């Protein structure tokens, strides 16, 4: 046995991904993952595209391909980004094995141990992992219901000179909140004065309940380092395809391509070509497959979001704050401060799993000095470390619930179980 | 613009991958890549497996999946490794996005800047990149026609205390040579006395011309750190699937899974399930698709290898050494020392590209203190650095030729062009 890399040894397993294992139990109800409902996806359209790729391609569909991505998919993703009002060119797009890979490669290419990265408080856990893995100091910046607070961002930029500022401006993971247009302008203005690279993660904006995809933060953004914009096909085509796409500024493009050469060479050729076909696919009635799939998801997720919030409001104690998203997949609840230490969502998860439900405790969404932060006795893992339940960890009073994966009746059953778990804790 | 990570900034683009761009020119003949001939692959069998996956799966084929890999593919890869006489269990197998990803993750998980990695001289360039990218000192160990020299390995283990020893014992890339069984025993004995992790890259052993896949080095290997064994489906199913599989010792498995969680989450679900089906697929006459595809490739590659060697022997000056592989995809030529500095294969590549052929100069297969080492004026890249052509770089008198990708008549035309290029250099 060898000692592990110093920085890597601070990275913990993802609880969200470990909890995935419970989805296979029939009676288990998970509110944990950021997994879209696969029954809402365009299975027949996707299948047809895969068949077309296999039928119409030459032997090159089985051959090695270029690192940057299949040309037709880079073009299709450029058009997808142009629909979001970004001046995207296919030449600046790198196709990735899920948009997660871009975060991982960015961390590798840019960060030196000890460098600082700013993130929203709370933020996407696997981004924290990617930055922590290369020895970055990950600093959470305070947010309100409108996203990151410009004055706090300005202060953090001045105090830490971060190499990267990682933001999820629209239907944020984990909170579901979005920046207003005015807030975006303020954030752009603040960032433009610093050398920090803006990394904008925009996996969820197509899932706007009202059907109007929000404008990205980097839409009108100009700064010295520019911005990396991350799009994903996981939330509306299929996560199983593992396809993300990043719009990358000129100065950073070649280094990112080299990093991808060394990591995965390129992504699945069949999947990439099928995805490109699907993005341009028009059904006999003239509606695009993409728009039809998104319409179905938007309507369903909005109804589920409303149902979940209504059910949660019935259960939680007075003073609990629940976000009110207008898109995406998540709601975030903050229990009132006076319930500390009665409610510790990190401890709640054990009882929840016994009652066959899962959610992600808020602590997962904050960087912590000493990882691993996760304790959950019922999940089989040999490397768990017990932390003092009384330690005042950020996020202990919070929970992320996903409303994307379960039907309304199933959510109702899940909420009944959650009510029991909560009563046990408050007893 | 930001400065790049200190270690990463020493990593150059892969010339092999840049040269891929030339494959699309109709008249261009490339001996460069390690790309199998896709016309030899089982296109109809693979297509049928993809169709079966899409027809028979539920919605979960479009959903997120587990990081370790699809269970049926882990099982199938365990059986594949058992056929190579390894005591492989599915539980210790991690499916990766190409076996390259394993090298990249291993580098991340294990290496600290300044650590040493031992490799064969010469070795696979993308392994050098992966190790260099995290700040490793990559030390090439002298080899003979039988692979790494045990006494030299022993000395290097003692002198450098390497964390990883990376070897390609069978049909080595780039030389095509293989260790004898006796040499393997000696190498095992030498390695077992040290803490270095053996990383055995075995992409090529199924391509034995005589049909008998060679026994892996780690077959009977026991040591403190154990071994990571890398298998690939790229060389006999399809590289476009991007599927590799690693057999990983218990102590290292969880860290590798965490690293893959953070990099790509998991690979393409459709591709993984189709690959699992294909590995078990039996044709109506009772022959497995895998064995039939391999038989076709072996016979074709052997004939091409013989033809290329015969043609090369007609062209090269007296005293040139050409390896005589009995499997794999490559031959390696060493020009005699007295041709230095007349022949510098790194300079030869420019004239070669003008004559519409490509091969990989030997310099690419050695670690160099200051990357990038590659100069090729005709290849469009903005970051090229000119090096002093007189610098005595290892590999300047060597070339790797792949015999896998071209028919014998095409190779003949290619060799005529190579003869001209060589005459120009020797003039």
Image: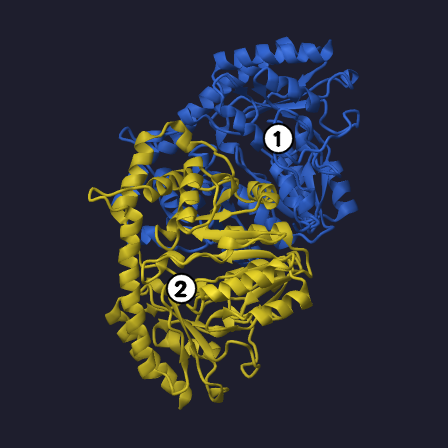
Chain colours: A blue, B yellow
> Circle 1 — which element?
loop
Q: Camera-side residue: B64 or A276?
A: B64
Question: Percent from the top left, x then y, of residue A41?
Answer: 40, 28
Q: CA distance from mark 2 to mark 1?
A: 50 Å
Tag shown at residue A136? none
Horizontal relation, residue A88 to residue A427: left or right: left
Q: Both on one chain, marks 2 and 1?
A: no
Is residue A223 visible in this depiction of the protein?
Answer: no
Which residue occupies 65% across, 45% down?
Answer: A131
Q: Residue furthest bottom?
A: B427
Please give the residue where the numbered disc 1 appears in the rendered image.
A180
Q: Residues within 10 Å of mark 1 (few under 14, many from 20)?
A: some
Tag shown at residue B33? 2
Q: Pointers 2 and 1 in contact (CB under 8 A)?
A: no
Question: Percent from the top left, x then y, of residue B314?
Answer: 31, 83
Chain containing the residue with disc 2: B
């Amino acid at each position: 046995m060898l000692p592990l890399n110093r920085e890597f040894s601070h990275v913990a397993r993802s609880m969200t991904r470990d909890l995935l294992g419970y989805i296979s139990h029939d009676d288990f109800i998970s509110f944990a993952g950021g997994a879209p409902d696969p029954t809402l996806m365009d299975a027949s359209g996707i299948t047809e595209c895969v068949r077309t790729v296999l039928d119409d391609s030459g032997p090159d569909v089985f051959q090695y391909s270029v690192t940057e991505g299949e040309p037709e998919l880079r073009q299709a993703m450029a058009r997808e980004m142009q629909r979001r009002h970004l001046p995207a060119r296919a030449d600046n797009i790198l196709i990735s094995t899920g948009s997660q890979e871009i975060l991982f490669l960015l961390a590798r290419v840019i960060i030196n141990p000890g460098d600082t990265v700013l993130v929203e408080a709370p933020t996407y856990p696997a981004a924290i992992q990617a930055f922590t893995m290369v020895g970055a100091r990950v600093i959470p910046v305070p947010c309100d219901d409108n996203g990151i607070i410009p004055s706090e961002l300005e202060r953090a930029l001045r105090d830490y000179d971060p190499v990267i500022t990682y933001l999820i401006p629209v239907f944020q993971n984990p909170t579901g909140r979005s920046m207003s247009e005015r807030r975006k302008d303020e954030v752009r203005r603040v960032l433009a004065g610093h050398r920090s690279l803006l990394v904008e993660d925009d996996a969820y904006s197509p899932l706007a309940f009202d059907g109007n995809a929000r404008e990205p933060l980097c839409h009108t953004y100009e700064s010295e380092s520019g911005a990396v914009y991350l799009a994903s096909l996981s939330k509306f085509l299929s996560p199983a395809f593992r396809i993300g796409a990043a719009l990358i500024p000129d100065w950073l493009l070649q280094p990112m391509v080299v990093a991808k050469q060394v990591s995965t060479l390129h992504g699945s050729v069949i999947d990439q070509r099928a995805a490109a076909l699907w993005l341009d696919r028009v059904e006999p009635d003239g509606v695009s497959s993409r728009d039809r799939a998104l319409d179905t998801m938007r309507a369903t997720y909005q109804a589920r979001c409303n149902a979940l919030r209504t059910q949660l409001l019935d259960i939680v104690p007075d003073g609990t704050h629940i976000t009110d998203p207008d898109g995406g997949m998540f709601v975030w609840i903050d229990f009132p401060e006076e319930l500390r230490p009665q409610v510790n969502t990190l401890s709640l998860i054990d009882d929840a799993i016994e009652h066959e439900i899962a959610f992600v405790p808020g602590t997962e969404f904050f960087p912590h000095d000493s990882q691993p932060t996760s304790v959950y006795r019922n999940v089989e893992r040999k490397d768990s470390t017990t932390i003092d339940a009384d330690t005042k960890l950020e996020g202990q009073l919070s929970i992320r619930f996903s409303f994307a994966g379960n039907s309304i009746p199933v959510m109702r059953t899940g909420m009944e179980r959650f009510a029991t778990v909560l009563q046990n804790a408050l007893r």
